[in-house]
Image: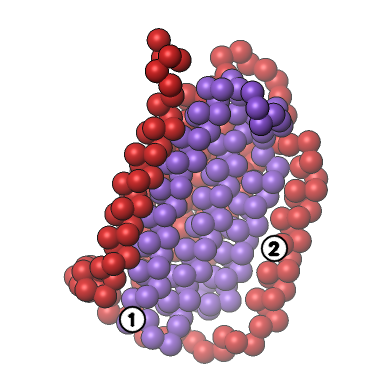
Chain colours: A purple, B red
Amino acid sequence: MSSLQDYLLLSSLLFSIGLAGVLIRRNAILVLIGIELMLNAANLNFIAFWRFGPNPSALTGIMFALFSISVAAAEAAVGLAIILAAYRHSKTTDLDRMNSLKG
Amino acid sequence: MIFAVLTVAGMAAAMGLRNAVHCVLALTAGFAGVAALYLQLGAQFIGLTQIMVYVGAVAILAVFAIMMTHNPEPVKQPAFSSQWFVGSIVAASVFAVLAWEIRSSTAFTQGLPPQPYVTVQRIGDALMHHFVLPLEIMGLLLTAALIGAVVIAMGHEEEMK
C-alpha cells in the first residue's frame, strides 16, 4: 500500500462492493448503507489524490473530503427518515414488496 | 495492507450477511478501516472526522432505523433481491473496468511526495478564510436536512393519535 494505484484499486473495490449491495440487497436500509460505502470510496480517492498530488500543502483534497463527509451525513439522515416514512406507510422495508407508488 | 484487508472484509461482510444488525456491525469495522487508511495517508483530521461521523453517528442511526423497522414475526425471506445475479454481474464488471483502467494508466509514475505539514490550525485557518462560503452553505444544508428529516419521520398528527 504505497502507491496511488493501490489506493485507487482499493477504492474502486469498495465502490463495487457498495454498488453490489445497492443492486442486490432487499432491505432498504442496507441499500442506503451501500450508498454510504460508495461515498466512502469517493472520499478515499479524494484523500489519495491529495496525498500523491503535486501540491499537497494546498489542503484542497482535505477540504473536499470534509464537505463530502458532511453531505453524506445529511444524506444518511434524510434517507433514513424517508425509509421510516415509507415503512409507516407500507409496513415493510423490503424493496421487492414496495411496488406501488400510490398506496 | 492490513487496514485495506480489514476494510474490504468489513464492507463485504456488511453487504453479504443475512442479519441486518450484523451487517451494521461489520460496516462499523469497515468504516474504522477507512479511517485508519486516512491516518496512514497523513490526513489525521479526516480520519478522526470519519470515526466521529460514520462510526459514531451514521452506524448508530442505521441501527436505530433497523430496530424501528424490525418485523416482529420472523418470516424466513431471502436477504437478496430476485435479480441478485444480474446485480453481481454489473458490480463485478464495473470493478473490472475500473481496475483495468487503473492498471493500464501511465499517469502516475511519481513516488510518494514528502509528508505535507497539515495541522488542525491550518485547516481551521483555511475554513475561516478561503473556504468560509462553502462552510456557511454546509451549515445551512445540514440545518435544512436535519429539520427536513425530522419533519419527514414525524408523520401526521392524526396517525399519532
Specify the quadrant that holds the C terminus of chain B.
top left
Query: Few, some or many C-alpha atoms within 10 Å of disc 2 (few <14, some 14-19, many ≥20)?
Result: many
Which residue is found at the position 44% from the left and 24% from the top?
Answer: B155
When the figure is inspected, residue B103 is found, relative to residue B84, above or below; the finding is: below
In the rendered image, residue B34, in percent from the top left (x then y), is placed at 46, 58
When the figure is inspected, residue B57 is found, relative to residue B115, above or below; the finding is: above
**Observer-nearest of B143 and B95:** B143
Find disc 1 in the rendering and name its residue.
A58
Disc 1 with disc 2 on a shared chain: no
| Viewer-nearest of discs 1 and 2 | 1
Find disc 2 in the rendering and name its residue.
B95
| A29 on left or right of B139 | right
In the rendered image, residue B7, in percent from the top left (x then y), is placed at 52, 55
In the rendered image, residue B47, in percent from the top left (x then y), is placed at 36, 60
Q: Amino acid at mark 2?
A: Phe
The CA span between labels 1 and 2 is 31 Å
